[in-house]
Structure formats: C-alpha cells, structure tokens
Image: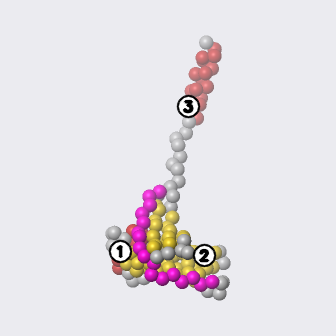
Amino acid sequence: MHHKLMTLLLLALLAGCAQPQLEQPKANGAYLVIEDGAAWAVLVSDGKRVAEAGRVLDVVKLPGQHSSIAASYVIETANCGKLQWLTERDEFGEITRLAPSGNEQLARPDCVIGNGLSRAWTALDYSS
C-alpha cells in the first residue's frame, strides 16, 4: 500500500510540473536560385514556400574587392516582369537585395516576389 501511495504522489508531483510544449520556430528566407538559363525567386515565410520561376537575362560578376557591387542578376518572370538583384560587398561580407525599380508588376497579386522587396536575399548560382 505504501508503494502505491508513493507512486501516486510522485505522479501527481510530475503532473504539476508538466509545461505546455513550446511552439517550434518556422523556416524563413528569401532565395534567388540561378541555374544556367533558369531562375527561381523563392520566399519562405513561416515554413511556407512560394516560388516564382523565370529565365535569366543577364549575370555580371565583378571579381575583387574594389567595387561595392559583387554581382548583378537580371531575370524575367511571367508574373513579375524584369527584375534585378544586386549583391553588395561591405566590411561584413556580401548581401543580396532586390534592386529598386519602377516595375508596377511587383504590386500585382500573382507576383509573389512583391512580398520580399525589403528582405535580404541569398543568391545561389549553380550555373556551370
């Protein structure tokens, strides 16, 4: 009997210490993926991924540390039109941003890139 009483007391104590599960963090990011002539602008927000496929119009990479611009990527998509990303160098490394433009197509509801205008992007160039 004493053994059962101790088990019940221990279970009651442990039950009182139980805490609700913490919410798991969700993936977030903005990626420009280049592979030869194909391009994808991918936005991940709260674990949900949306992508805008397009084609590469121009890629310019500037070697060396003498320029603040490391690379320029120009792509064209059906829903968002022609867009340019610039990879800028500074003392902390490189950061890729969608270049400001007067492209009115970015405001269209079917252009998923419009939601990532202010985000820092990661440029992934898999071209050969």
Q: Nearer the viewer, mark 2 or mark 3?
A: 2
* Residue type, numbered disc 3: Ala
Q: Please tell me whether mark 1 sits on a helix, a strand or a loop.
A: loop
Indicate which disc, 3 or 1, sits on the residue closer to the N terminus: 3
The magenta-colored residue range is: 47-63
Who's the residue at 63% across and 16% down the image?
3
Residue 56 falls inside the magenta stretch: yes
Q: Nearer the viewer, mark 3 or mark 1?
A: 1
* Residue type, numbered disc 2: Glu
Residue 122 falls inside the magenta stretch: no
Who's the residue at 47% across and 62% down the image?
44
Residue 15: mark in rendering:
3
The reply, left or right, for residue 58 in relation to residue 8 is left
Relative to 56, does residue 15 appear above or below in the rendering?
Answer: above
> Which residue sits furthest front?
128
Residue 78: mark in rendering:
1
**Displayed quadrant of residue 105:** bottom left
The reply, left or right, for residue 13 in relation to residue 78 is right
Q: Nearer the viewer, residue 3 or 112?
A: 112
Position in image of residue 23 (x %, y %): 51, 48
**Displayed quadrant of residue 57:** bottom left
Indicate which disc, 2 or 3, sits on the residue closer to the N terminus: 3
Q: Is residue 120 visible?
A: no
Relative to 42, does residue 26 appear above or below in the rendering?
Answer: above
Contact between marks 2 and 3 (CB within 8 A): the answer is no
Q: Nearer the viewer, residue 123 or 47?
A: 123
